[in-house]
Amino acid sequence: MRLRPRSLLGISLALFSLATIVRPADAAGPTYFLDESVAVGIDAPSNSQFLPDGRLFVVGQYTAQVSLVVDGSPATVHVVGTIPGVRSGGEAGLIGVTVDPGFPARPYLYVHATHSSPNEIRVTRYTLTGDLAFAGNGAMTLDPASARVVLGALPDVAGKHNGGTMRFGPDGMLYVGLGDDDIPCRAQDLTKLQGKILRLDVSGMPAGGGPAPSYSALTPVDNPFVAHADSAARLVWAYGLRNPFSFTIDPPTGCLVIGDVGNDGWEEIEFACTGGQNFGWPHYEGPVRTALTCVGADTTAFVSADYQYEHVGLGYAVFAGPVYRAPVGATDPFPLDNEGKLFMGDTWKGWVRRLAPSGPGWALAPPEYGQPNPTDWADSPRYITSMHVGPKDGSLWYTMLYRTVPSSGPGEVRRFRYIGPTTGVDDAAGGGAGGLAFTGAHPSPARGDRATELAWRQAAPAPVSLRLHDVRGRFVRALASPGDGVRAAGPHRIAWDGFSAEGTRVAPGIYLATLEAAGERRTLRVVRL
């Protein structure tokens, strides 16, 4: 039988409360996170993929154009090329892109698109030329004569539910998401590739252009259905999916995080850490049994979503963002309490949520200070189609299909960049002319097991936030938060035992304690030896 749903939105919401926090009128995310434009003028960017050097490939759904965003202020956009023969409209067009993990020695770009004559989905590999090593301006060009079909002749009957995302895993295999083509029971039929995540070994494909290899030539020896009599089934990694337009891969674990777009009731996030899982569509949408039954389906093997949310009617589409891992040497890493958290959201409803592991599933993470409401980490960016952690800055980059509401105009590349607390420091009993002031940190420096007592005074009753960061701006621990309630006017003290939010002793060094109340902010240096 189908497993019990593992995390429901209603249960998660009951766990949290958050006092009202004043945010700037144009803010999208929490305090200290800047939602900023990186590149504009890319028409309907449907998907994207970073190179390790920070350059970003972006594909335009309706123009079939591949662009390259080279980080800057503002970023420079180079046109790499246009994919020929793409049929666009509605959900169709150029909808997927990824780069060979052997780049630049293997200078291959892979695209996923719908084509006409006949109507079909193809995954095609192209060779890139130009400034591969990023020794100059970073521009590259797609060689149209190098086109080699990886997967072709996949029927596109409905023109929707095409999937789109492709990613290479840490195992070097190419994972490809395909929707059910609006023929629901294909998601349960292992001999059909629709409604699946495929896992392909493309390392043996010869250089240059040419036709698609056989399924057998693409089959990894350790795929879950490698012993199946049908060659298509041997390519399947996960099935029972309606339209896995977006998925990400968490490099340390190799887990696929799949956003499966629902029908008219539920949107789902699934984790596929092992191959062969059946996520139940079309027998189930979220936790609800549908009226559909597919002949031959193993209904005892269905796996429930790790996170799901209910809706009424149309106009919803879940997207799966990354599990946040700050890159080594990142210039603007998110605070430490974001490590291992999953960022996801809804393309059409315009919100981003932050999830944390919860038992066997995932649930809403405790609210970040200053986020717009207890549920949503950010509440205004609409039309998000892909999201990544920037390999150089550690920011959360995303593509917007359109820039305006209602949907119109060109798209945009944006990012949430962590800008940290104020760098102004009150070294002892300072505090300015306002009503909020630190009155000391004792002892500072503190050694070993000795706690540091942080003292302050406030002129009026107010909720208080007291957070610790390291000198690079990374979050260490919250000692007080607005959700704790209103604190009275007068003096207050809180002791810090030298441990982080994760329960580990912090390294010796300088830390910044940031105090906020009633619209005022003070920062104090704290030293531990």
Image: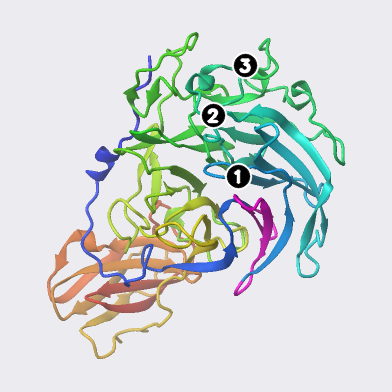
Q: Which residues are magenta?
A: 49-74
Badge 2: few (under 14), some or many (20 or more) residues near its Cα, within 10 Å?
A: many
Q: Which residue is mark 1?
A: 88
Q: Earlier in the sequence, mark 2 or mark 1?
A: 1
Residue drawn 51% across and 55% down? 401
Report which residue position mark 3 lands on.
Answer: 191
Q: Would residue 123 be counted in the magenta stretch?
A: no
Picture coordinates of residue 314 (x, y %)?
36, 40
Measured from the top left, where is residue 48 in percent x and y?
Answer: 61, 52
**218 shown above or below 525:** above
The vertical placement of 424 against 191, above or below, is: below
From the viewer's perspective, is residue 458 above or below residue 433?
above
Q: Amino acid at mark 3?
A: Thr
Mark 2 or mark 3, earlier in chain: 2
Instruction: State the residue lying farthest toward the bottom.
Output: 433
Say which residue label 2 marks.
181
**Percent position (x, y) of residue 525?**
40, 77
Mark 3 and mark 1 in contact (Cβ < 8 Å)? no
The amino acid on which the numbered mark 1 sits, given as a three-letter code, is Ser
> Mark 2 or mark 3: which is in front?
2
Quarter of the image where the N terminus is located: top left
In the depicted structure, whether residue 251 falls above or below residue 180: below
* Distance between the alpha carbons at the discs numbered 1 and 3: 27 Å
Q: Indicate left or right for 97 with 517 as reference.
A: right
Considering the numbered disc 1 on the image, is that residue within a helix, a strand or a loop? loop
In the picture provided, is 466 more to the left or to the right than 412?
A: left
Q: Please, what is the three-letter code of the amino acid marked with disc 2?
A: Asp
Q: Is residue 307 left or right of residue 244?
A: left
Residue 112 image position (x, y, % from top left): 66, 41
The secondary structure type at the circle numbered 3 is: loop
Between 198 and 418, the residue placed more toward the observer is: 198
